[in-house]
Image (spheres, coloured by chain):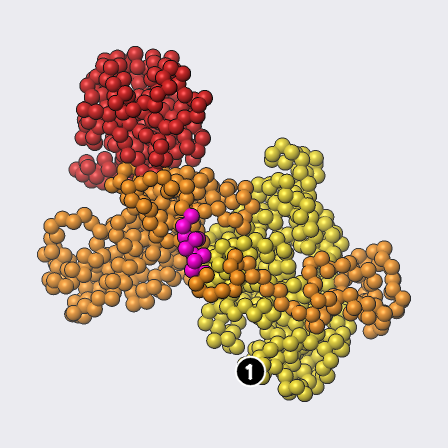
Chain colours: A yellow, B red, C orange
Amino acid sequence: MPDAKGRRIALGCEGSANKLGIGIIAHDPVTGEAIVLSNVRDTFVSPPGTGFLPKDTARHHRAYFVRVAKKALAASGVSISEIDCICYTKGPGMGGPLTSVAVGARTLALLWGKELVGVNHCVGHIEMGRAITGASNPVVLYVSGGNTQVIAYAEQRYRIFGETLDIAVGNCLDRFARTLEISNDPAPGYNIEQLAKQGGRVLLDLPYAVKGMDCSFSGILGRADDLAAQMKAGEPGPDGEPFTPADLCFSLQETVFAMLVEITERAMAHVGSNQVLIVGGVGCNERLQEMMGAMAAERGGSVYATDERFCIDNGIMIAHAGLLAYETGFRTPLEESTCTQRFRTDEVFVKWRD
Amino acid sequence: MALETLQIEHVPSDHHVYAALFRDVQNVDFLQAQLIGKNPEFEYAFIDASVIISRTHLLAAIFRALNTLTEGTLQTPNVHSDIVIGLSPTNNISESYRRYGLTPSKTRDVLVIKVVYPKLSSENSTITNEVPTPASIWQHLTTHIQGKPVPLTDEELAKSTDWQKVRKYYKLNGVPGVERIDKADEEGRRREMEGLVVSGIALRGL
Amino acid sequence: MCPSAPPERNGRQAPASPKQKFAIINKTTAQPNPSATNLSPDTNRTFNPRDPLENYSTRLMDTSPQSPPTKKRKMATSTSTAAAASSEQEQEHQFPLPPILTHPSAAPPTLITQGAEGRLYKTTFFSPDIPCALKYRPPKPYRHPILDARLTKARLAFEAKVLERCRREGVPVPAVYAQNAAAGWIAVEWIEGAPVRVKINEWLGQRPKNEEEEKAALEKDQGPLVELMKRIGSAIAGLHRTGVVHGDLTTSNMMLRPPPVKTTTTTEEGETNGVSSEEAQEKAKLLEGDVVIIDFGLANQSQSDEDRATDLYVLERAFASTHPRAENLFEHLLESYKQSFKKGASVLHKLEDVRMRGRKRSMIG
């Protein structure tokens, strides 16, 4: 039931990768505003040179769920009775971590007597991005460790116009960080970005793989790994000069981001849009934002991006998207509150938009 | 008869191209000797007319050479020799001179091209500081080429085209794009071959 | 789950008490405009999970709601003014001519289209009587200039080579007149006529005075539209046989070049249709001519069934959305494709897969 101020409240739980996030959001039916009441996140960071494994990640989520939930509740200032529903990430994502969080969500739902809403992770990013930035109908570039998609809304679906044909761009960057044994704290992509700022003397030749509206990253990762090995062995680069990890990071970013901007531009031309919204962890990258901005400027358009509270996986986006669905009557009965590793963005019926 | 000024699309306005066709040239060896000796009075492109199928064919090679001239990417010492090698679809320079340039005792009809453009002072001829004019060029050509000038038209060019050579040099024998055209439609076949020849020139170096 | 004295982890100092830890975190992250550099390492590890994951650390980030969340970046060169300003910008966008077109020509070049891929101009080449289409890919300022130059040159060079190869093999495509891939342009033969899309819509738009005629013709499998579909099918078969896939097959990327005007044998047309109405004959002329495939900017070299089937699928979808009335005629195109090409049957088989999959693959989260 609505809280004292007449608002609908939802608690959202996210844990599809190594970020465990729980957030509480309020929707004001009068003003149509979405108000972030709390947004707490705990990130599981693996040592340099390694990636986070599902088993350990699930363990982390289970270990931290209760305290993060408590914290979110405390910070929000709302009482349990005022919460309308419990939202959780149904997918896509890693199996173990997803399930761990789902168990937590179900527990809260049963404990507190609330209904459940299963949410698509990508839709969560999109809806939060739209709410935060106010972009009305942008082409969305969703880029993270697990996803790379170019999306545009049409007729109650978020349609995928372009995507990666193999691995996600974030995955490519994360794995390269492992190759270079860069720290994963706070995030491997962040550290690559900082290192890249020290590069720029040379642009190494990396394969550029855009195929129509799609792109692929395993080829460029392979080549980058080869060059890294070359560098470690003390061999000079293709131009005969020695090169550094900074040069590699710089070249990798320039190439993969150019690819992303290109497929985004193509989608924009296709649907006739001038707005771009970048969501997902890789969306925090300032170089990517800069490049996208330059492309959009040329078209007389604009780029929308959020800060790391919202572009990195978080619980509030799940709460927000979940509450939107809940308000159209959508429910996930307990027996259907499963998780799925594969859950395409366009499978969701976006009833809350026309 | 006079020298023809070729109007070529998309060429800088201060670049002028002149052309002439001479039949039954008797002193091909002399002309070639001037080129080999780099005689500064003979800055021309001399082309064996039997490998040229049409004006468009010629213009394609001239355009290409002018483009490399303005870009600063000439492959030979001057734009005139670049025109000659530019006729070839391959990068083999010496073969190009042999096939498309003058061959004493073989070449009978000679196409002459002259490009006049603002040169850097270092490139200026030390002998004549005057800019060549169509009249002066024509005077020079008719004086030194022992042949009969004829209008540079498609009809004239067609009279001397050695199609066997053209097909060989541009690898047009058995090409499906040509073969699928009815043998009776010779005009159609020739037009298709012209298209492939022009493309071959355009793609040279890629 | 109350943590006891937290251990040292990763060489970092343990804090005095967990409660204090909460307070510290609350304060440090509640900042007005957090940026990426805000991600300071979490030096005070509190939480002591029941199963210590010794080798791992976690970062707690209290993403407080109080601070303004919006980070809208307006990257447009003009400010937030309206259509007037943006259309002026458009004008500017349209008219930086590529250097090659700044030299004299018989008539000024006309801009035909501009898209994400670049600009297309109509002009003449070599002599004033040879019309041509000049495709120009301007530099993309968002890309690193070296990367941009490499890409543009490689793509245009590839496009020119593909066109030449197709032409040699007898695939109906424009001839290449000239190119300067490094400078970002290629000039190709101008194809007279109209895009197939336009022609088909014209044909479909004309209501036949006699619907029976039209039906009878279609049933007899001999209508001009059926014939056109077959011609398209065999043109694509030729393309694929050459080892090239177009990458963007739509009825806008195919031209219908009208046959050279000669005294038309109207009686012949009439008999083909099975009826001898003048209207049917006139209408039939709409769809006469050669199918010429254009715009190979997204083409690729491929012999895989998957890529070929994708080519057909893209066309099928495009056809269905632009000519819904004629959707069921696509079968004729596919049939003709199969007949014209040895591998045709296996490609059509693959097409069924591609259709079912819709977009290519599922994403793992």
Can residue C196 be spotted in the picture? yes
Instruction: Choose top left, top right, bottom left or bottom right for residue C319.
Output: bottom left
Is A63 contained in the magenta span?
no
Compared across the picture, whether C361 is left or right of C126 comes to right
Q: Which residue is mark 1?
A: A329
Instruction: Assign a secondary structure to mark 1.
Output: loop
Is C90 contained in the magenta span?
yes
The residue nearer to you, when weighing A301 against A232, is A301
Residue occupying image coordinates x 36% and y 65%: C321
Residue at the front extreme? B130
Residue occupying image coordinates x 28% and y 59%: C198
Give the image location of residue C103, x and y in percent. Answer: 36, 39
Mark 1 residue type: Gly
Instruction: Give the magenta range.
Output: C86-96
Chain designation of label 1: A
Quadrant location of the N terminus of chain B?
top left
Can residue B175 be spotted in the picture? no
Give the image location of residue A341, x and y in percent. Answer: 60, 65
The overriding secondary structure of the stretch rendered in magenta is helix
Residue occupying image coordinates x 48% and y 73%: A156
Compared across the picture, whether A200 is left or right of B20 comes to right
Q: Above or below — where is A178 with respect to C154?
A: below
Q: Above or below — where is A35 with respect to B28?
A: below
Instruction: Choose top left, top right, bottom left or bottom right for residue B135.
Output: top left
Q: Above or below — where is A337 with respect to A281?
A: below
The residue nearer to you, when weighing A197 against A163, is A197
Residue occupying image coordinates x 82% and y 70%: C23
Give the image location of residue B24, x and y in percent. Answer: 20, 17
Q: Count neighbours of disc 1 (C-alpha within 10 A) and say few if under 14, some if 14 to 19, many if 20 or more.
A: few
